[in-house]
Image (tube, rainbow, N blue to C red):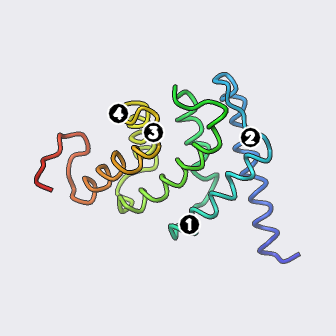
């Protein structure tokens, strides 16, 4: 087997195990990922990183997203995998859009606050409105929580 393929396969196994380990916590919210769903999300992670031209070391952002969003009143078993996939894509996109000026935890916290608050569980609203305004404020060097002027 090609050394690069072996490394990728070994890393995939680690990633899947980390994501599946979150089930111990998320099952109290009625959310559980199967092996196939975890594998799918890891595959989507690779695609998102490639699309956004990002490199990520370690366990990746998916476990943090799982722990941050599992208690949302808008996420339930039927939309869990799709929601995680979209949130993961949005994270990488807006990490780039914010010019990496914020930490991963700050972006996730903002995403969760907006998703559960003004977006009322709408991933489209989160991506098109909440995160776009957030990234614009960061690029302009503005305070993230001040009221935005209409002069943009």
Q: In terms of sequence position, does the residue under pointer 3 or pointer 1 come before the other?
A: 1
Instruction: Give the distance between the C-alpha atoms of the residues marked 4 and 1, in whole angstroms.
Output: 31 Å
Question: In the rendering, at what x and y percent does residue 58 appear?
Answer: 63, 55
Task: Identify the image quadrant of the N terminus.
Answer: bottom right
Question: In the rendering, at what x and y percent does residue 67 appear?
Answer: 58, 35
Q: Is residue 73 above or below residue 107?
A: above
> Mark 3 against mark 2, which lies toward the viewer?
3
Name the image quarter holding residue 18. top right
Evaluate if marks 4 and 1 touch, with contact meaning CB atoms under 8 Å apart. no
Q: Which label number is shown at residue 122? A: 3
Residue labelled with disc 4: 118
Residue labelled with disc 2: 20
Residue labelled with disc 1: 55
Q: In terms of sequence position, does the residue under pointer 4 or pointer 1 come before the other?
A: 1
Evaluate if marks 4 and 2 touch, with contact meaning CB atoms under 8 Å apart. no
Crowding around mark 3 (Cα neighbors within 10 Å: few <14, some 14 to 19, many 20+) is: some
Q: 93 left or right of 38? A: left
Q: 6 left or right of 108? A: right
């Amino acid at each position: 087997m090609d050394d690069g393929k072996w490394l990728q396969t070994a890393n995939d196994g680690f990633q899947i195990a980390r994501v599946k380990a979150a089930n111990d916590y998320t099952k109290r919210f009625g959310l559980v990922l199967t092996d196939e769903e975890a594998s799918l999300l890891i595959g989507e992670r690779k695609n998102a990183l490639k699309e956004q031209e990002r490199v990520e070391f370690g366990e990746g952002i998916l476990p943090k997203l799982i722990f941050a969003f599992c208690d949302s009143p808008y996420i339930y078993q039927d939309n869990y995998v799709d929601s995680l996939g979209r949130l993961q894509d949005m994270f990488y996109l807006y990490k780039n859009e914010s010019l990496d000026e914020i930490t991963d935890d700050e972006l996730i916290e903002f995403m969760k606050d907006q998703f559960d608050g003004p977006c009322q569980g709408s991933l489209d609203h989160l991506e098109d409105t909440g995160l776009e305004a957030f990234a614009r404020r960061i690029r302009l060097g503005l305070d993230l929580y001040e009221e935005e002027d209409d002069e943009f």
